[in-house]
Structures are given as structure tokens and as C-alpha cells.
Image (spheres, rainbow, N blue to C red):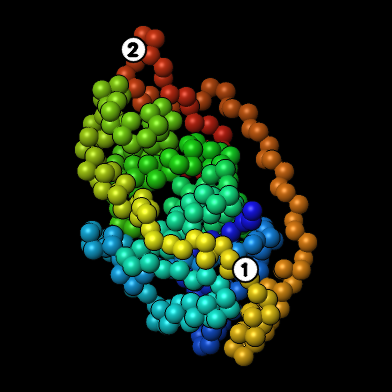
Amino acid sequence: MGTLLAIDGNSLGHRAFHARAQDAPTGPHVTDTFVRMLATVWSQGPYDAVLVGFDAPDNRRKEEYPEYKAGRAPSPPGLHDQLDALRAHLSDCGVAVVSRPGAEADDVLAAAADGAQTRGWRCDVFSSDRDLTALVGPAVRLLRPRATMSDLVIDDEAGVRRAYGIEPWQYTDLAALRGDPSDGLDGVHGIGPKTAARLLRDYGSVPGIYESLHDLDPRIEGLLRAGRERVERNLLLMAPIPRLDLDVDHCLTCAVDLDRFERVLGPLGLTSAARRLVGAFQAPALPPMPPPPVEEEADGATVTPLRRRAPGRHVAEPVVGEQAALF
């Protein structure tokens, strides 16, 4: 089969806007930067189809929970016009541009990744949003730019385990326990990501943790009881909208047409970006990444026990090495 590149249009569009707004306050500068991003990430392919997901104007989560993302600063002037122009330009270039009523770009990408896998395709998800870590699996990677596009993190299953100490499918549960201040969602006060990761390693999921409260240290038990309502709310808001209506078969036919890109972008004054994309397509693919070195566990590492100390009862293993440094 093939490989789908599923792009978070809002995440990367915002990034493009802030990267170029001062240098190019007028004109389609977001489209220019976005196409250059696409050219850069193409070295991780090649790809057989491209989909760009966008937030819908209405938001089901905000309707159900008004505090969701309420603390974010207002959008800067011109951003929405630039994103609307980006959507139109990508559609004119033949790219599958998708949004669904009430849904966010994350929901579209989750549905696309799931649909691609059921059809035997692989999928690379391109976004700055760590929440999409939950999509990573045997056939799905997360491509996440950091400070610059050249500083691209490739999150596969092994990388997620190294970074967070959990399986990718547990990431939503980790975020629900930890909370997400950027979305206005508090988690369990007093439980950070390291403790949340150890709980998930021991009990598998948030329901598994709450079924085992009596096995936990009394302090941890008390914190989890006090934060249960917030955790349940977070799980509902952070999980992708289920059974999202998406024509995956159509999306998998939307390959990049270089001639069409040049015809559309040239009159916009974006010939340089179009040529960069053509060059990326013609360049040979990068060799596969070698596996990272295995780090030895530090001697004598200690952690606060999560469970009550009882004879013969297992105590959580310490978090050491790269995991501890990244939290």
C-alpha cells in the first residue's frame, strides 16, 4: 500500500503565521511558509497522499465545557484571514483539506490515521501538538517540529516509551491525570507526569488506577479521589471524537501534483516555495535512522512509593535516565 502524510493545518498554520508575520505582514506569507514546511518534512517520506486537517468554526468541546481553551490569548489580527487563504490555496493545489462540524484538526487526523491503517496504509502525522502522541502505533509516527523545522522529533512507539515511560495509547490517560493548562484543563493536583506514568505502568489505564485505589499510598489515594471529576472530564475532552465522518478513500487518492502547485503558487508570488517543494520531491530519500543508544539505569535511584508497603507486595520501579530528565 502507501503512506499518508496527515498535517495539522491549524497547528502548522499558526506556527507559519508567527514565523513570518513581522517579515511579511502582507501577502500569503502563511501559505509560503507552510509549503516550505511541507518541502522540509518530505525528506521523511516519500508520501503517496497528503491530507491537511483544520478546526471547524464551531467547537463541540467548547459548547460542552466553556472553560476549554478559554484562557488562550485572542488570535492576532490577520491570522484567520491567512488560515482561510491557506485552506483555499491548498485545495486549489489538489490537497485534501478537511474539517468536520464541531471537530478540531486533532479529531480529523485521528480519523485519518485510523482509516489509513484499516486500509493497510502507514501514516505520518505532522504537528506541533504533543496530544497527538496518542495516535502513535506500529504504522503511525508523529513528526513534531520544535524550535525550528530542522529540529524535527520523530516519535515512534519506542521513542514514546523512552520519552514518557508509557505506551503511546496511554498518553491521553497521562494527559488527563497531569492536566493541560494550555487548554484550561487542570489535572490531579499534586500528581505530576512522572507519578502519573508510574501509575499507568502499574495499572494500565485511568479506570485501572481508580479500581485499585485501596492498593495505593494513602496520600496518592487522597489526591486521586479529590481529582476524579477533573480526570473524567479530561478524558472526555482529550479523546478524539469517535466515528468522525471522513471519506478516507478520497483522501488516500490526493497525491501532491507538482505541476498544479506551480500553477497555483506562481501567480501568488510563491514561485520560490513551489520550486523548493519540487526539489524536495526530486531529492533522494534519507536513509533510515539508526536506533538510539540504550542507556544504563542509574545505580541507587529512589522514588516516592506509590503503593502501601506490605510484605511481598511489588513496589513501583524508579524512573531514571532520559525519562526523568524529560519531565
Residue 13 sits above or below residue 129 on the image: below
In front of the other: 41 or 101? 101
Query: Dot 2: what SS?
Result: loop
Q: Residue at x 47, y 24 (%)?
A: 317
Q: Position of residue 164 (x, y in %)?
A: 49, 40
Residue that lies at the very extreme toward the bottom in this rendered image:
267
Residue 281: image quadrant is bottom right
Residue 172: image quadrant is top left
In front of the other: 165 or 112? 112
Q: Can residue 21 be seen in the rendering of this structure?
A: no
Within 10 angstroms of label 1, few (less than 14), some, or many (20 or more) residues? some
Residue 77 sits above or below residue 308 on the image: below
| Comes first in the chain, label 1 or label 2 | 1
Q: Position of residue 104 (x, y in %)?
A: 38, 63
Within 10 angstroms of label 2, few (less than 14), some, or many (20 or more) residues? few
Residue that lies at the very extreme toward the top in this rendered image:
311
In front of the other: 299 or 18? 18
Residue 302 sits above or below residue 15 on the image: above
Query: Dot 1: what SS?
Result: loop
Q: CA distance from mark 1 to mark 2?
A: 59 Å
Camera-nearest label, 1 or 2: 1
Q: Which residue is mark 2?
A: 310
Q: Which residue is mark 1?
A: 255
Q: Do the residues under discs 1 and 2 have CB atoms within 8 angstroms?
A: no
Q: Position of residue 113 (x, y in %)?
A: 50, 54
* Number of disc labels: 2
Q: Residue at x 53, y 65 (%)?
A: 251
- Residue type at numbered disc 1: Ala
Q: Residue at x 60, y 64 (%)?
A: 49
Q: Residue at x 28, y 31 (%)?
A: 210
In front of the other: 56 or 180? 56
- Residue type at numbered disc 2: Ala
